[in-house]
Amino acid sequence: PFQNHLLVFPKNRCTCHGLRLYYQVLNFGMIVSSALMIWKGLMVVTGSESPIVVVLSGSMEPAFHRGDLLFLTNRVEDPIRVGEIVVFRIEGREIPIVHRVLKIHEKENGDIKFLTKGDNNSVDDRGLYKQGQHWLEKKDVVGRARGFVPYIGIVTILMNDYPKFKYAVLFLLGLFVLVHRE
Amino acid sequence: MNTVLSRANSLFAFSLSVMAALTFGCFITTAFKERTVPVHIHVSKVLLKNVDDFTGPRERSDLGIINFDISADLEPIFDWNVKELFLYLSAEYTTKSNALNQVVLWDKIIQRGEKTNIILKDVKSKYFFFDDGNGLRANKNVTLTLSWNVVPNAGILPLITGSGHMSLPFPETYETPRSY
């Protein structure tokens, strides 16, 4: 594939091993920086700090299950309205939550406070918010879910739940990159 | 193609490509579909109270109690790429303190294969209709709409509002509180 266009392997046999390693490292660096550029580009286009998230809990079943992938946007021009699926972070907690907006109260200047609830939960999220916090605000929002692909994120969950699996995958990948001649 | 490993590798790569193509096909063939249908909403009872908001901030707020009828035929929406419809009935209104308020009163999940012709009479609201303050009293225009979130097998998650809404004014006085 595109590796053929990247770097041409010279026919110089004397410095074979050193040059080969050098080109492999360069190739690897090109792949990593391309991936990083695409990710950062997505962040800019969607306006979200995390444009793709994996669903971690079953609180939105039967719509989303653990391991599903969500595509988010967080454009300022899109107002938050009820029914939307928002991914938000509670102050002081790292893990983002994917739930649906149940109630909004918006002032004329655009300040908005809203309440969320998971489809599969029987009560709203006030029990999840910080002590004394009754509403979420725009600053808590990571993004709004606009697209969805099932199952793909299951790899991320496997890697989180079974760290040995993660190390095994990383080890095999490293081995593969080193051994593969192209 | 002469070892088990290379055959397995080819097979795996091929199945991944086919699945990716199918998923993309699902998405692109339904991405631009119109997903609205006409709905009929009718309100059978409206009651207004003023109590402490026990669901959250413990301030004295207006509490609306509404019973309603809904009818909608959602059959045309379901196609090969619709996994579920998340229906929700929401009330939208303006008050002195907030330019826009939206409250979901009731919701329902319809999965593919379930009954799609919804005719419900005298439904009680699922969620407490508390205002952020006392803006429901004598409110001239509270609009009820039925909307749905289309959850596909893969693709976009649009929010569609059914055509047909119901606007109603709220009573000017509070009902005498009754213990429930």
Image: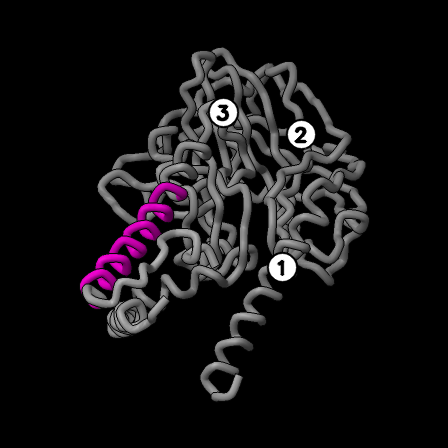
Marker disc for residue B62: 3
Please say if B58 is above or below B135: below
Q: Which residue is mark 1?
A: B21
Cα distance between the residues tagged 3 and 1: 53 Å
Q: Position of residue B156 (x, y in %)?
A: 60, 45
Instruction: Residue under label 2, please give it.
Output: B144
Q: Which residues are magenta?
A: A17-38
The subunit carrying tag 2 is: B
Q: Amino acid at mark 1?
A: Ala
Rate crowding at label 1 as few (under 14), some (14 to 19) or many (20 or more) other CA atoms within 10 Å. Answer: few
How crowded pointer 3 is (Cα within 10 Å; few <14, some 14-19, many 20+) is rated as many
Q: Quadrant of the C terminus of chain A?
A: bottom left
Examine the image and state in which quarter residue B25 appears.
Answer: bottom right
In the image, what residue type sits under mark 2?
A: Leu
Position of residue B67 relative to residue A156, above or below, is above
Residue A161 seen in this snapshot: no
